[in-house]
Amino acid sequence: MAQVEISKIKNGKSNTEGQDLDTVLAQWRKERPDVDPSAIAVCGSVWRGAERLRRGVLSNLEEHDLDFAGFDVIMTLRRQGRGQALSPSSLAKEMMLSTSAMTNRLDRLEQRGLIARTRDPNDRRALKIVLSDSGFELVDGIFASHVAAVEKMLAKISTTDRQKLCALLSNISALSD
């Protein structure tokens, strides 16, 4: 039976992280010795790691009254450069979202004055989304603290291991549905 080594989450464990994965695997191996449960340990480790990173990023965004949805939109727009605009569908595609998921996000950010919807000069029926000056300044201010927060969470992982982790996770991302 193939076995996967599980590294335990020891520091800062919260009650949302559930049972130790080694224990979960041992329980399943006892109850269902005919099925190798090692794949669920991989998923569990990815989900738990993602949740820890999500919480860390959110805590950095709280003072700016931003959630992941809004943060993702303004970061995507900021990467385009000052004054650069994207159509809502292009923005959704870059963020791997449906266009229907984009409307509410854009409404909230527009109400806060962080983005503007403008007419597409090449197609009067279409819109473009651009960061406002205050949105641009907010993203620039958040970006440094965002990178610092992520760096702090990943501090114990070497550059080489980070590259390996990215390569391994890209294998999951490359799977088609």
Image (cartoon, helix red, strand yellow):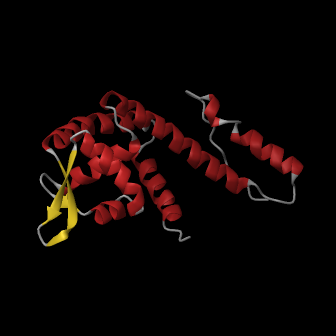
Q: Position of residue 95 (x, y in %)?
A: 36, 58
Q: Is residue 160 above or below residue 90?
A: above
Image quadrant where one finds the N terminus: bottom right
Q: How many marks?
A: 0
Q: Quadrant of residue 10?
A: top right
Residue positioned 33% across, 27% down in the render: 63
Residue 97 in view, yes or no? no
**Hey, which quadrant is residue 85 in on the image?**
bottom left
Quarter of the image for the C terminus: give it: bottom right
Q: Nearer the viewer, residue 58 or 127?
A: 127
Q: Position of residue 97 (x, y in %)?
A: 41, 60
Foreground pick, 62 / 20: 62
Q: Position of residue 155 (x, y in %)?
A: 41, 35
Q: Which residue shows up at 78% across the image and 58% down it?
A: 36
In this rendering, the answer to whether 9 lies above or below 97 is above
Residue at 51% x, 44% y: name it.
Answer: 50
Q: Is residue 110 left or right of residue 30?
A: left
Q: Nearer the viewer, residue 82 or 172?
A: 82
Inspect this view and state whether residue 9 appears. Answer: yes
Depth order, front residue of 9/98: 98
